[in-house]
Amino acid sequence: MFDPNSSRFASFSIVSTLPDQAIDNVWFIIDNDLQGVFQLSNLIQFNLVNSDGKLSYDFIQKNELVATFDSPFPYDNGYPKSLVVYDSGDRQIIATPSEINI
């Protein structure tokens, strides 16, 4: 699950609201900070939060905050409040929860 060699995409709403570096950072967190540390389902949830003007990613499992990952990227109020990453087995996509009916 969440194999870095699988096809990876981001939905239109994610691409139109988040900078490329912030999207790439989601994949980085999954590959380098979550894999092998946490038991992951095929659906991962992050809340995007303002941490002193910088974007942080709160990793949520079972409706509880598990870990926070800071980034060097500036936070913008236009960012979605949360995003999900879904692995279908063939493809992976970053989307807003409403785009995949969560």
Image: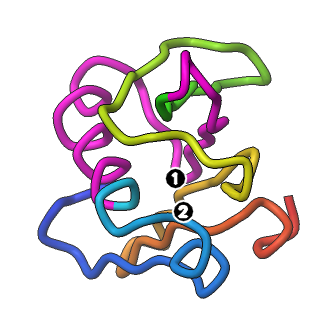
On screen, residue 97 versus residue 26, left or right, reads right
Residue closer to the observer: 11 or 48: 48
Query: Horizontal and vertical percent for residue 1?
Result: 33, 54
The three-letter code of the residue at mark 1 reads Asn
| Residue that appears at 75% across and 45% down | 81
**Residue drawn at x 30%, y 48% as measured from the top left:** 25
Residue plotted at (49% across, 13% down): 67
Most extreme residue toward the left is 5
Residue 6 within the magenta-colored segment of the rendering: no
Q: Find residue 5 and report its image quarter.
A: bottom left
Q: Inspect the magenta stretch and tell me whether residue 52 lies in it.
A: yes
User: How far across and how far down the image is residue 55, in percent?
Assistant: 49, 34
The magenta stretch is 24-53
Query: Regarding mark 2 in the picture, which secondary structure is present there?
Result: strand
Q: Nearer the viewer, residue 27 or 77?
A: 77
Residue 97 image point, x, y percent: 78, 60
Picture layout, residue 6 above or below residue 29? below
Q: Quadrant of residue 2?
A: bottom left
Counting residues from the N terminus, which is met first, the one under dot 2 or under dot 1? 1
SS label for mark 1: loop
34 to the left or right of 58? left
Specify the amino acid type for callout 2: Tyr
- In the displayed structure, 9 sits above or below 75; it is below
Residue drawn at x 56%, y 19% as measured from the top left: 51
From the image, which quarter does the C terminus lie in?
A: bottom right
Q: Cβ–Cβ below 8 Å for labels 2 and 1?
A: yes
Colour setup of the view = rainbow
Q: Which mark is residue 42?
A: 1
CA distance separating discs 2 and 1: 6 Å
* Label of residue 86 in the image: 2
Question: Dot 1, how many residues are within 10 Å of its Cα: few (below 14), some (14-19), or many (20+)?
Answer: few
